[in-house]
Image (cartoon, rainbow, N blue to C red):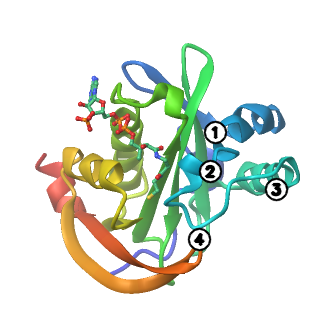
Amino acid sequence: MTNDSAPGADATPVPLTTGRLTLRLYRPEDLAPSLEYYGDPEVARYLLEDAWTPEDAESRIAKRIARSGIDEPGSALALVVEHEDVVVGDVALWTTGDTVSRGEVGWVFHPEHTGQGFATEAVRALLGLAFDYYEMHRVVAQLDARNERSARLCERLGMTREGHLRQDWWSKGEWTDTLVYGMLAEEWKSL
Ligand SMILES: CC(C)(COP(=O)(O)OP(=O)(O)OC[C@H]1O[C@@H](n2cnc3c(N)ncnc32)[C@H](O)[C@@H]1OP(=O)(O)O)[C@@H](O)C(=O)NCCC(=O)NCCS
């Protein structure tokens, strides 16, 4: 059985607060702090996109402002993560397939703010939203298989490594492997 409707973007309970972080919707002034880390080729190394130019940043932020909640297949929620009023990274949840019952999560953090568990804390809150609020059945994360820090993050969160796809993505001039991690609602509830 699948849901074909969700509680609605307007009602999404954001900002979300965790022990150390605030997760909130994007606003135009997030352009400069986002470009600070998305402009770094090291940060973009395992992303599907290249490092942002200032021109890229404008269109990217405009798209993210529109991603304000899950209410139909194809919709998404993009959240800026702040620690003590400073942008430290961002997380996103989007639907996969033709239903809102299955989702995918993604994350990018500023290198100056890694190594403190902020990504773990923020993505855990996002999974809470996916399973407890949007009542999703299954959430996945897909990552470049060389992205060991993201794989460790998935494992800290209790996700299961479900697949290693060989050379399935052409990224930055080469074929790359993809890891698929997944979590089911029943697993989230029993954590
Ligand atoms: C992927 C990424 C978010 C991981 O960042 P990270 O700092 O390793 O993850 P966290 O913020 O959860 O921090 C965990 C680290 O902090 C340490 N830590 C310190 N305090 C902690 C705490 N209170 N709670 C949890 N971990 C803590 C952990 O030991 C861990 O370090 P380790 O992996 O060396 O053991 C980051 O590398 C990144 O943004 N990369 C670039 C973008 C990218 O590749 N995105 C993913 C595309 S799929």
- The image's mark for residue 37 is 1
Q: Position of residue 87 (x, y in %)?
A: 61, 27
The residue where tag 2 is placed is: 41
- Looking at the figure, which quarter contains the N terminus? bottom left
Q: Secondary structure at mark 1?
A: helix
- The image's mark for residue 55 is none
134 left or right, relative to 47: left
Distance of label 3 from label 2 (alpha carbons): 14 Å
The residue where tag 3 is placed is: 56
Please name the amino acid that badge 1 sits on.
Tyr
Dots 1, 2 in contact, CB < 8 A: no
Farthest residue toward the front? Answer: 173
- The image's mark for residue 72 is 4
Up-down relation of residue 67 to residue 98 (above or below): above
Q: Nearer the viewer, mark 2 or mark 4?
A: 2
**Residue neighbourhood size for the residue with mark 1, other residues' Cα within 10 Å, grouped as few (<14), some (14–19), many (≥20):** many
Residue 183 in sight: yes
Please name the amino acid that badge 3 sits on.
Asp
- Mark 3 vs 2, N-terminal side: 2
